[in-house]
Amino acid sequence: MQTCSRDLDPLGDEIAEPSAHLDAATARLLDLIREFDARGGWNVGFRSCAAWLGWRVGLDAGAARERVRVARALGTLPLLAQALARGELSYAKVRALTRVATPETEEQLLALGRAGTAAHVERLVRGWRRVDRQAEARESTRQHAGRALHVYQDEGGMVIVRGRLEPEVGALLVQALAAARQTLYQETRLQHGDADPVDAFAETPTMAQQQADALALLAETSLHHGIDPGAPGERYQVVVHVDAPVLAIPISPASRSSRTARTFPRNRPGAWHATRAA
């Protein structure tokens, strides 16, 4: 005789209830992992917190890395963290959502997570990432088109410099100016090492003046030593660490074209924390 589905409802409830408790326990576990990671408790001969988890808890390397990643992400995503702690969202859903969630999009993604299954959430996240890549490519193109530098003289003969640079180029300029300032004013301090501290303080230029002097040093150095753009594609290197599951995500033709659109031309520096190639 076939059992009525209503007769199995209590059994289903018994399955769902401990599942919610497991998710709540997982939320607590992630809180502990985040604190342990932040305080460097794993730094006793292990390469990372994930490596320590593999040894201490028996997680495989991939699962351990995911636990650490999700734990860190939830530190800035309180709504998702609370939903997991209350058993409202499963760990599988939260793990997927933390790949794309930001404090600005967290509430919207939480609602989507509540409305679908874990499989639906995974598909949603893949689509969201494709849209993000396309939006990033459009923003990069817009910023590149908006770059400008204006150099002109005022009535008194002073040269005015005004410009708008892309974030990566701007970061490179800021770093170069800081290095030039340090070089200039280290020499100044060495030259006036025996001077009266009050006199030395009175002669210290303002930050704006130091920036102007640093820019002059960069220009003089460039003209004196020549401009060396380096070998194409080798001037600056960017090291990107990507987990294997991320690489396994299918990439649509549209996202491939957007990725190409974001590639820097050969005569431009690479990225925010780019380093000179050997």
Image: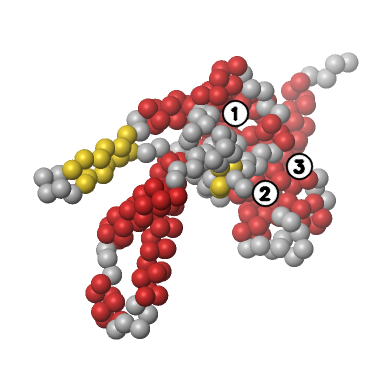
Q: Which residue is mark 1?
A: 125
Q: Dot 2, how many residues are within 10 Å of its Cα: few (below 14), some (14-19), or many (20+)? A: many
Image depth: mark 1 or mark 3 in front = 3
Outermost right residue = 1
Residue drawn where x is 31% and y is 57% of the image:
213
Q: Are marks 1 and 3 in contact (CB under 8 Å)?
A: no
| Position of residue 232 measured from the top left corner of the image (x, y, whole percent) | 56, 34
Q: Is residue 166 left or right of residue 22?
A: left
Work out how far the residue at label 2 is from the one at label 1, CA to CA, in angstroms: 19 Å
Front residue (pair 143, 107): 143
Residue drawn where x is 40% and y is 58% of the image:
180
Name the amino acid, label 2.
Answer: Val
Outermost left residue = 155
Q: Which residue is mark 2?
A: 68
Front residue (pair 177, 60): 177
Q: Which of the marked residues, 2 or 1, is nearer the chain's N terminus?
A: 2
| Position of residue 275 measured from the top left corner of the image (x, y, whole percent) | 56, 48
Residue drawn where x is 35% and y is 83% of the image:
194
Q: Which of the marked residues, 2 or 3, is nearer the chain's N terminus?
A: 3
Quarter of image, res 199: bottom left
Name the amino acid, label 1.
Answer: Val
